[in-house]
Amino acid sequence: MRPNLTKTAMAAAVASTLAVNVAYATQDEIQELKQQLEQQQAQLDALTEALENNQGTGEGWWSDTSFGGYAELHYNNINSQKSSKDSVELDLHRFVLFFGHRFSDKVSFFSELEVEHNVAGEGKNGEVEIEQAFIKYQYADNHSAKAGVFLVPVGILNEVHEPDTFYGVERNNVEKNIIPTTWWEGGVMGSGELFAGVSYDAAISSGLYLDAAGGDFKVRDGRQKVSEANATDLAYTARIVWNGVPGIQVGFTGQYNPDLLQGDVVGTVKDVDATLLEAHLDMQKGPIGFRALYATWDIDSALDDVKAGASEQTGWYVEPSYKITEKLGAFARYSQWDNQAADDDVDSNYEQMDVGINYWLVDTVALKADVQKINEPGNTKEGFNLGIGWSF
Amino acid sequence: MTGAIASMKSVKYLLFCCVLLQAEPALSEQVYFSKESFLQLAFPASEPKSGVIWLTSQRKQVAKELLGHSPAELRVRYWSLNDRSAWILDKVGKEQPITIGVIIENDEVQQVEILVYRESRGGEVRHGFFKQQFVGAQLINNIDLDRNIDGISGATLSVNAVTTVTKWALYLHEQIF
């Protein structure tokens, strides 16, 4: 037994010596490898950073300049009871470019340049218009001021009217004929957030100007488009918007125009003050959408001498919708409006029903189709519209 | 001469200070959380470990589908501890990047926060009533959230930015666990 024990002890001693030697060598190697690895990681980090920084176009004036736009092409096929009013046409209704520039973190510029009905010029159908061109100054947290040409803060479509954001090939007639959308003025406007979910806008701007001598009485005819606009009497606008629950917006706007005639005296008609009140609900909860809007102009009764009943111009619509899939939505809209609502004896009420679908190829490209029926004074129109609209 | 050099130096120093002042974030860039305070929120008990995830071509492909563009960077930094991860990611809403923080545990969103908001409109996304919608959200089929996120009128692009970044963070979280 003894010799065996001795042998075992010797073997164990040799083995442990070897093991220790091996361990020492490995630790050295690990140390060396570690250093190499660290160096390589540092090189890798430096290379990655350099690569990441060199990508893109780098810095320059263009990095502060933004560009976008939208357009809509419409096909209208409307039959009228009075065949003289039939209308079948294809129209590049709007082609719009946005340009913006950020001068500093606080001061920026935004503009919207629009070509309507494709060809503008002497005797042509279209118009070239600057709908927005303003400088915005962010003077405090959540508060800013604008000066220039801006869209009047009213209604659902007036400020946000990219074709992919609403149902129906054509914009609704209530906002068009009563508010009157698209409506822009020149002046100054303050905007901001009062508290979580409640925002305000307040503006002093050029006002509407009706050529009463020429027989104009509809508020829509009073838009001067900030083109050598008569600014004898300015307009005052205020809006409150509640956004406190995702998917729901409620807005109220009021505007006061001291004189729609801007100082003109037409016979006995003068000092025609006007007040617009507008309220709307815009809801999109999951697939269910609902829009409702009411707008009314209360105008000095002197305007009734220009056109019977014109001292009240009122309209409203309701528009339920349902998104059948992410890409396909259907809607129905019922509208009513009257630009001579103050006189019940005048047949001046319009009624319109639309039913249709939007199909979004991608989020901001929409194909649209709808059928419509309009009961207008002394006539009925029926037909369908097709359209494609996009924005970027 | 030394006096002249000294005054030159002080002029340079003054100029440097002016540049620093200029570079200070202006009002429209609103910082709601610093990186540190966001991480403190995500890991209140102990220090997380920091890691990077490399954007392989497959991950870039997913990014393109989720974010609408292939990211410029080659890797994304994250912080994690046990089953929890935190991500700080930038996404342009309309014109300017919004810095968004997402905290995820077990493939489920725990919290979404806006760290820095730079857009001129749409800042309502920072409010609790909006962010609350993401709590518990999971990614399905690598592309969709398991729920509908209701938007905010007038803030659509910021809403989209926060939604897509949340999806991207959920995808990246799955890649590391």
Image (cartoon, rainbow, N blue to C red):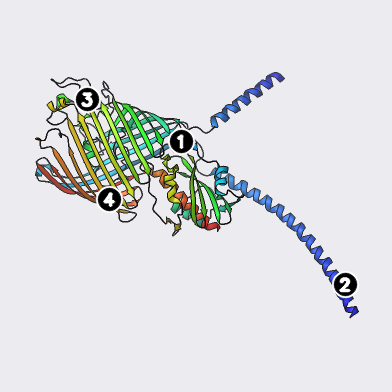
Q: Marks 2 and 3: which is nearer the front?
A: 3
Indicate which disc, 3 or 4, sits on the residue closer to the N terminus. 3
Judging by the rendered image, the residue that carries numbered circle 3 is A273
Q: Position of residue B106 (x, y in %)?
A: 52, 58
Label at residue A64: 1
Q: Amino acid at mark 2?
A: Met
Q: Earlier in the sequence, mark 3 or mark 1?
A: 1
Q: Earlier in the sequence, mark 4 or mark 1?
A: 1
SS for callout 3: loop
Marks 4 and 2: in contact by CB < 8 Å? no
Q: Earlier in the sequence, mark 2 or mark 1?
A: 2
> Which chain does the numbered disc 4 sit on?
A
> Same chain for marks 4 and 1?
yes
Helix, strand or loop under label 1? helix
Residue at mark 3 to residue at mark 4: CA–CA distance: 38 Å
2 vs 1, front mark: 2
The numbered mark 3 sits on a residue in which chain? Answer: A
Q: Nearer the viewer, mark 2 or mark 4?
A: 4
Indicate the secondary structure of the residue bearing disc 4: strand
Q: Amino acid at mark 3?
A: Asp
To which residue does mark 4 refer? A321
- A339 vs A286: above or below: above
Mark 3 surroundings: few (<14), some (14-19) or many (≥20) residues within 10 A:
many
**What is the chain identity of the residue bearing mark 2?**
A
Residue type (three-letter) at the residue carrying disc 4: Ser
